[in-house]
Amino acid sequence: MDTSALFEKYWPIAVALVTVLAWAFGMGWRSRKLMSRIETLEKGFHIQNEDTVYVILAVYALVDGQRRAGQNGEVAKARDELQRHITSRKYGWRKQE
């Protein structure tokens, strides 16, 4: 067989193979790009979550200070509720006695 006969016989397979390889390369590139975006979002979420923890702890400190200053009633209820929330979450804090 000469090369022109081989080309005529196998060109659809060669075109299909090149197309599949190009598609697979493009999917790999897109998936790497998507994973990079997800990692960036996760880092931002972690920072935002840390900020939320600090705000919750600051509010707790304020409410606890008001309770220790003698303001009971609603302040004590808010402090207890906030303390339950903090200790129920995985902030690494334990209930203080």
Image (spheres, grey):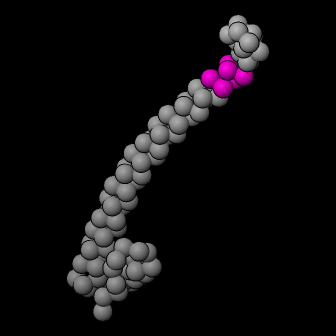
Where residue 27 sits, quadrant-wise, is: top right
Of the 4 image quadrants, the one containing the C terminus is bottom left
Q: Percent position (x, y) of residue 30?
A: 52, 34
Q: Is residue 85 above or below residue 15?
A: below
Query: Residue sitting at 34 percent across and 84 percent down?
Result: 94
Number of marks present in the image shown = 0
Of the 4 image quadrants, the one containing the N terminus is top right
Query: Residue sitting at 49 percent across and 34 percent down?
Result: 29
Where residue 95 sits, quadrant-wise, is: bottom left
Would residue 58 be visible to someone looking at this image?
yes
Would residue 66 be visible to someone looking at this image?
no
Query: Residue sitting at 43 percent across and 75 percent down?
Result: 89
**Along the line of sight, the residue nearer the viewer: 73 or 79:** 79
Task: Find out whether residue 15 is within the magenta segment.
Answer: yes
**Along the line of sight, the residue nearer the viewer: 25 or 55:** 25
73 with respect to 17 (left or right): left
Report the residue that reaches farthest toward the top. Answer: 4
Q: Which residues are magenta?
A: 13-19
